[in-house]
Each structure stands twice: as C-alpha cells, then as structure tokens.
Image (cartoon, rainbow, N blue to C red):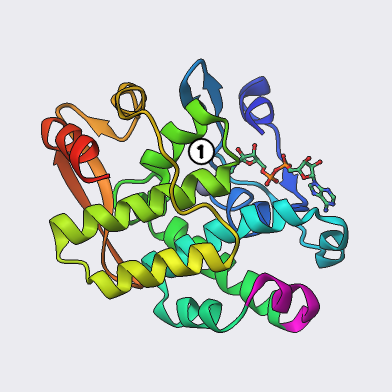
Amino acid sequence: MYTASVYMRGLKFGFVPTTILAMVDASIGGKNGVDVGAYKNLVGMIRQPDFLLFDYSMLQTLPQHEWINGFAEIIKHACIKDADMFVLLEQNSIENFQSDKTLLAALIEKNVQIKTTVVVADEFEKGDRKLLNFGHTLGHAIENIYQLPHGHAVSVGMVAACKLSEELNHFDTTEKQRVKHLIEKYQLTSSISFDKESIWDTLKMDKKRVSNEMNFILLNKIGEAIIKPIPMQQLEKLISQSL
Ligand SMILES: NC(=O)c1ccc[n+]([C@@H]2O[C@H](COP(=O)([O-])OP(=O)(O)OC[C@H]3O[C@@H](n4cnc5c(N)ncnc54)[C@H](O)[C@@H]3O)[C@@H](O)[C@H]2O)c1
Ligand SMILES: [Zn+2]
C-alpha cells in the first residue's frame, strides 16, 4: 500500500481484506506506514483505496488467534463510540459470531460504519480520528518490545488507558472492570508485567507526542472518549506508579 502510494506519485489500489482486523480497521481510512527500527509506522501517508471488497466466506479459514486479534479493534470501537455495541459484545462471544453469519455481518458492518464516520469527518487526524488510538499508545510500545500480536498489545493498552481514565478522568471503577472482563471474555490479554523503563523509552518516541505532552485517549464512560494531553513528566510518573 505504501509502495502503491509513492510509486510515480501514486497508483490506484483497492483492498480485499481477509481478516477480521483488516475488515474492521486496517482496510479503512487510507493510513499506510512502515516501521523504522523501534519507531512504529514512522514513514507513511494517508491515501484512500479506490475500492474495498469484503467476502465473509474468507473468514472460514481464518485461524482462531487471528479472530481473537481482530476483536481487540472491535472492543476498541465499542469503548470509544458505541455503548450499545459494548453490551452486544458482553452478551455474545467469538463462538456466537463464528456460528451466526447474520450476527457477524451486522457486527462487521457496524464497525465499518464507526471507523468510516470518524475518518470521513477527520481524514488527517486533527481531532476525532485521534480517538481511534485508544489503547494504542502503550499498546504500540508493548508490541514493539515484547513482540505481542497487535490485538493483545492493544488490549493491554486499553486496560492501562482505563486505569489512567479512572485516575485522571473520573472513569467509573465498575466500567473499568467491565472493559477488563470483556477483553478477557474475548480471550485477549488484559495485563502483562512489563519493564517500565524500556516501555517509557519507547513511548517517548511516539508520534503522538507533541513537544512536552502526549495526546492520550481516555474514556469518560463506555462509548465516549476524549483526547487528553498529558505532560510527559506526569505520564512518566503515572506509568511507574499506577500501571
Ligand atoms: N492502516 C491501519 O489503520 C492499520 C491498522 C491496524 C493494522 N494495520 C496493519 O495491517 C496489516 C494487516 O493486518 P491483518 O490482520 O490483515 O494481518 P495479516 O494480513 O498479516 O494476516 C495475519 C495472518 O493470517 C493469515 N490469514 C489472513 N487471512 C486469512 C484467511 N482468510 N484464512 C487463513 N489465513 C489467513 C495470514 O497469512 C497471516 O499469517 C498489518 O500489517 C497491520 O500492522 C494497519
Ligand atoms: Zn490497531
């Protein structure tokens, strides 16, 4: 995608996503990027595909661990934008979605709608699109250092972001527990013991850092997120003491 975007100043391209993650997230929004050393997606651009072609029958062969991975982004969408979908996820399980094609198609369509709405309103991430980074700031740092699959790293990041939301944003403790339980219900990782110093060293390099602050995504409540600039000094303290 990156190559197509830069070759001769850009070729037309389209996607046929074959994973849950790609259907609900990666194929939508036109972001591309390549990692440079420890820097995630440092070189890249935003360029929209000409078409998307979804064929749900592809998912019949998708390995179980890739299903699990994809649900992290679905849970993310529910946390930041859709409390009703959060409840739907609580009432179901991966197995339900795997055995009921109609239920699965409705879930994927809902997620496409959520991401598309955000991207159309803010293609170049000046505002609302930043909310899609929920769980990703810490998640990317963990993914880089511990080689965790993307979904698991993001889910660890989401639980950590919920803790910070509780501490800095009056996010309800019961709701924090609901997020953690949902993540565990979908067989994702809710916490790992990580070396705080090396995580901090990687986190400092994140592109979401703006001068001496990091734009962190916190929850007000399930289904509603905000962008909170946290001074780097305070963030360092929070990571070493609260996570
Ligand atoms: N642009 C974005 O906003 C964004 C967001 C998240 C991830 N990404 C990136 O998008 C890329 C795509 O992620 P992905 O989840 O599609 O991973 P992927 O294409 O790497 O697929 C994961 C694994 O599943 C296998 N696989 C895929 N579809 C299958 C199927 N239908 N049946 C059997 N096996 C199948 C693949 O061979 C591979 O081993 C990743 O590199 C990720 O970093 C981009
Ligand atoms: Zn992601």
Question: Within 10 Å of the Cα at label 1, are there few (<14), some (14-19), or many (20+) other Cα atoms?
Answer: some
Q: Which residue is mark 1?
A: 46
Query: Which residue is at a point 69% across and 82% down the rendered structure image?
Result: 103
The one nearer the camera, 138 or 126, is: 138
Residue 186 visible? The answer is: yes
Q: Is residue 23 left or right of residue 186?
A: right
Indicate the quadrant where residue 236 lies.
top left
Q: Residue at x 21, y 67 (%)?
A: 171
Q: Is residue 100 rendered magenta in the image?
A: yes
What is the quadrant of the C terminus in the image? Answer: top left
Look at the image and give the residue range highlighted in magenta: 93-102
- Say what amino acid the circle numbered 1 marks: Ile
Residue 232, image quadrant: top left
> Residue 207 location in percent, x, y?
34, 30
| Residue closer to the observer: 97 or 52 | 97
Residue at the extreme top of the image, as rendered: 37
Q: Which percent across, then down, holds residue 195? A: 37, 28
| x and y, in percent, of residue 180 in the image | 42, 64
Left or right, 235 with respect to 120, comes to left
The structure residue drawn at horizontal position 31% and vertical position 21%, both measured from the top left corner, is 201
Q: How many marks?
A: 1
Taking the magenta stretch, the answer to whether it contains residue 53 is: no
Q: Is residue 147 above or below residue 122?
A: above
